[in-house]
Image (cartoon, rainbow, N blue to C red):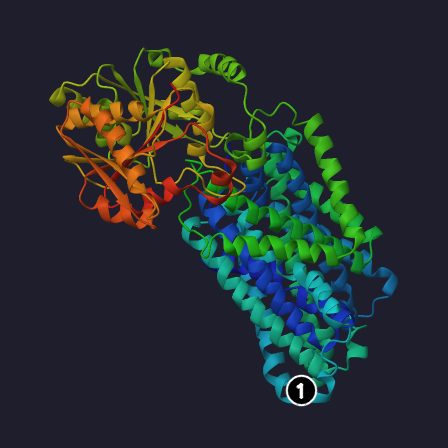
Amino acid sequence: MKKLERSLSLPYVIAISIGGMLGSGIFVLPGFAASLTGSSVWLAYLIAALCILPAALSKSELATAMPASGGTYVYIERAFGPLFGTISGLGLWLSLLLKSSFALIGLGAYLAVLINIDDGLTKLVALGFLCFILFINIFGIKKVGKVQIVVVSLSLACLVSVFLFGFPLVKPEFLSPFLSNGNKGLVSTVAFVYISYAGVTKVAAIAGEIKNPDRNLPLAMILSLITIACVYVFIAFVLVGNIPIEDLATDIRPIYTISNIIGGKYFGYAAAAIGVITLMSMANSGVLASSRFPFAMARDRLLPPFLEKLHSKYLTPVASIIMTCLAMALVIVFLDVVKIAKLASAFKVMMFISVNFCVIILRETSAQWYNPSYKSPLYPFLQLFGIFSGFVLLVFLGWMPFIAILAISAIGSFIYFTIGKDATRTGVLRNYGHRPALFLFYKKNRKLLKKEGKTLSKNLDGKLASKAGVVVPLLGNENSAEMLTEIASAINPRDSVQVVNITEVPNQTFLDAFKQDTPKVVSIARRLKKLSLSQGLNIDFESVVTHEVSNTVAQLSGQISCDWLVMGWSGKAHSGLLIRNPIGWLLTHVDSNFALFKDNGIKNIGKVLIALRPGRKDKNFLAVAERVCFFYGASLTLLHIVTPSFTENAAKKMETKSAQLLSGLNVPNDLKIVKSEDPLGSISVLSSDYDLLILGAPEKDSWISVLLGIGRDKFTESSACSVLRLTMKN
């Protein structure tokens, strides 16, 4: 299959991003925006930039993890699944082509300054420019980038000149009233001009064509956003400071007007010419990016396959480009400027809300293949701000955009269930995530789980269908595969240990591409063989590639019928209120006993501390601890932490009962009962004297634990030694 050529360097990417923003957002929109809020329009541009910043940083992160053409569509499809991917792809496609159509219509107003054009021919002129854009997009991406460099340079030079010469002429009386329609008018304006910044993330749609995307993509987005935000705010301030609001509110070519005021007619003509070029460039950039959405959707079998075909010479998606331009032509003919701008903003706001959700989903579910080289700062607060502000802006855009979003959702659903219904892919959220409400009030039927496991396990390699007592999945986050395997052998030393290296890839990646083991897998196999020979352990190692880590681990546990599932652990089983990571999912879904090992780098285990709350499974937990101590030749200390109000009589009863439990152990042991109002701090201090802390955990967590977090997770994070968390079901 042919691939898109990676031909775009950092300057080209910045130029395309700025070119996508530097157009109608400042050359056309300020007048309409001023009619909504008055002289505070510059503040609306600033707030809009702040509202879009989370999406820009989130998209930078997503793009470095998935540098493929399709951009936001790809991210949403991977996170939510193909149904939402289809809806988002259509929404993104429409938002970009609407904005590009808006630019072409505004182009006519600037062209009328240079040549005599009747108002009735403005749309015809826009259609003519659209045909030219169609041609250069088919001709080749690299040539587009070179054009963008020149256009962006001219536009920035023009706007910087407007600011430098216009700022000294600002009249204070024109700046009052500041909020002509109050705070509501200001927020409505923020929502209206939101689309002005859409181009900052547009380049993510062509990530597959960018050189060194790990560096160039986030850098281009951030630099272009800062640049354009400054330009918009400063120019908007100069406009309201030099043009009366009542005149500016009806002006569709404000850059020409202000240029004519501060520099005379020839400066005005030059600004009009640059406006024409800039708006055409913006429209071109929009076609470039929007046409990649149908291309990516067709590639994922959500649209007809002819849309994914590339030109034999120029390697551009011809059919997708033609379809995009035809849709733009219909918009230009049948919609007015204000409606186009509102619809474009609404679609873009909705998509950016989804982008912020994508980062949260992919981080919290800990999808193994999700490994971005750039990570958004201030996570998750930045993303939550982007989501909240996006919903606020949607409310202030009115009913028409809301109805349009519902219509696109319905159309997208229809397309998915007719064309893409056979798609076998599932989103990350479906595989790993679930709401606490489902976890709390809907208990999975174990018989159903076992039935599903038997069906799914047929897909696993027969070499794994052994009678191993312990299964050790290696997911790539372990400090030491050897140490984890040792712990597994210590937990259940009488049976063999099945170690399985699991590599997760997106659903869109064919598993056949991973027929050969990677050097890392070969290294693990060699080291575990050495461990097996040196310590006389019965270790079997295999490697699998999967689309779903959690389900594969659950299948392994069921197929092998093991007693224990032992996994490496970062220290958290619960990642948040809405989404749980694979560990949290497995705690609910596997039938075997479950051990989680947090390796803090301690190799020689000589002293073991087990912290228990008295319960019916204390003997079981102590039996495991005894086996671990016997394996390593270590001593065991049983720890109970009680409140200061714990009576002496109760303490004596606890001491007597615990001594009875310890008396049956064949390893050196002792008992500690500590009174403390700070169990977390006490364990943290005590753990410094031990090599391994063992925590007993209930089979199921309470709803309070799910919603507010688990103390055991906090104990693990604060522990100075390695931690072994045991969940016993059998």
Left or right: 180, with 158 as reference point: right
- Residue 588 on image: x %, y %: 47, 27
Question: Image quarter for residue 48?
Answer: bottom right
Q: Say if 601 sits above or below 614 in the image.
A: below
In depth, the one of 201 and 1 nearer the eye is 201
Left or right: 108, with 290 as reference point: right
Left or right: 577, with 43 as reference point: left
The residue positioned farthest toward the front in the image shown: 649
Q: Which residue is drawn at 61% across and 58% down?
A: 20
Q: Residue at x 45, y 29 (%)?
A: 700
Question: Image quarter for residue 336?
Answer: bottom right
Q: Which residue is drawn at 59% across and 79% down?
A: 161
Quarter placement of the C terminus: top left
Q: Say if 349 sits above or below 119 in the image.
A: above
Q: Answer yes or no: is residue 548 visible.
A: no
Q: Answer yes or no: is residue 695 visible.
A: yes
Q: Name the residue under label 1.
A: 170
Q: Say if 34 sits above or below 453 in the image.
A: below
In depth, the one of 472 and 285 nearer the eye is 472
Left or right: 382, with 573 as reference point: right
Mark 1 is on which residue type? Val
SS at circle 1: loop
